[in-house]
Image: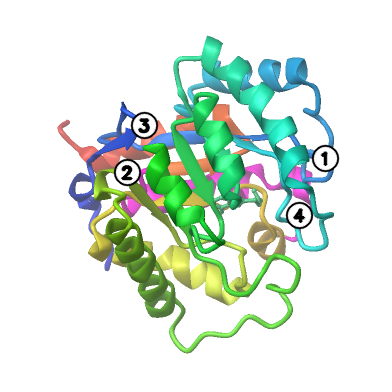
Amino acid sequence: MSAVTPGSVVKSGKVLDCAGRKLDLGTPRVMGILNVTPDSFSEGGNFLSVDKALAHARRMVADGASIVDVGGESTRPGAALVSISKEIGRVVPVIEALCAELPVIISVDTSRPDVMAAAVAAGAGMINDVRALLSDDALAAAADSGAAVCLMHMQGNPRTMQNNPRYGDVVGEVMTFLRHRVAACVDAGIARQRLVIDPGFGFGKSLAHNLELLKRLDLFHELQLPILVGMSRKSMIGRVLDKEVGDRLVGGIACAVLAVWQGASVIRTHDVRETVEAVRMCHAVVAGGF
Ligand code: 7PJ
């Protein structure tokens, strides 16, 4: 821990522009995961109806989530492909209902330009794209939307990414990728105040790669953008602790704390209540002032 400067969070204290709404990232925020897919790996099929999705989102907001991330296409290896209209049909009614009721930022987890546009028209303030706007027309759709964008790193594609991930220097290569995507966004007219970066834990990374990225997360401040991380219930925790997906909460909290300690601004999680508590405790130490 000696290489880590606890004050680093102050460097990335920023306000994120989410289609005109401002999200203050001066304190780290928790993004709650709302899957509206029948096949996502840890909560498969639980929140398929709008009412169930709403109830779960209400719970996450009451527990302290500042962002709710709505996903209609599973990125799990081997997951079935969903048509664009099916994805829109899943996420838009949920986003409309959430925006009408909840005082938080709604994010859409998608790589498809038509879904981005429909979701932002329905009230979403953030686009969370695991493909970092590399799909055809995604850059322009995101730029036009005015929404904030989370740019995530992935090596390969979801179907094959875990087959044999390879890097010379994982931190350097992920950072180079994100630097190029940030530049592409700025060139396309997306202001830096709308951008968040994410190393993409588990997306084309071995256990060793994931652990190194977490250990060196503070290096990503070089890009001078807020950092989002998603490690909740992922296999990096299962592998270290030898735990099944339903039994990874404590490991996930440890990862969240290590990320906030190094200045992460947003923690994406299934376990909002516990993560909010851990993040607040960690931030109290990081921010000082006592
Ligand atoms: C991530 C994500 C992540 C961002 C998923 C899962 C797999 N979006 N979407 N970062 N992971 N930004 O939730 O386990 O790590 S889907």
Q: Find disc 2 in the rendering and name its residue.
A: 194
Q: Is mark 4 within 8 Å of ligand 1?
A: no
The three-letter amino acid code for the residue at tag 4 is Lys
Q: CA distance from mark 3 to mark 2?
A: 8 Å
Apparent side of residue 214 relative to residue 188 in the rendered image (left or right): right
Closer to viewer: mark 4 or mark 2: 2
Magenta stretch encompasses residue 256: yes
Apparent side of residue 229 relative to residue 80 in the rendered image (left or right): left
The three-letter amino acid code for the residue at tag 3 is Ala
Q: Find disc 3 in the rendering and name its residue.
A: 19
Q: Residue at x 60, y 24 (%)?
A: 95
Where does the image place residue 29, in percent across and percent down from the top left? 40, 34
Closer to viewer: mark 1 or mark 4: 1
Q: Residue at x 67, y 17 (%)?
A: 54
Residue sitting farthest toward the top: 101
Residue sitting farthest toward the left: 289
User: Is any part of residue 68 visible from this angle?
Assistant: no
Tell me where the magenta segment starts and ends, as one range: 242-265
The three-letter amino acid code for the residue at tag 1 is Gly
Instruction: Identify whether 253 is placed above or below 57.
Output: below
Q: CA distance from mark 1 to mark 4?
A: 18 Å
Query: In the image shown, does 161 or 90 lie closer to the viewer?
Result: 90
User: Is any part of residue 38 visible from this angle?
Assistant: yes
Q: Secondary structure at mark 3?
A: loop
Tag 2 or tag 4, which sits nearer the N-term? 2
Q: Secondary structure at mark 1?
A: loop
Q: Find disc 4 in the rendering and name its residue.
A: 243
Q: Secondary structure at mark 4?
A: loop
**Do callouts 4 and 2 mark residues in contact (Cβ within 8 Å)?**
no
Query: In the image shown, does 101 or 255 lie closer to the viewer?
Result: 101
Tag 4 or tag 1, which sits nearer the N-term? 1
Tag 1 or tag 2, which sits nearer the N-term? 1
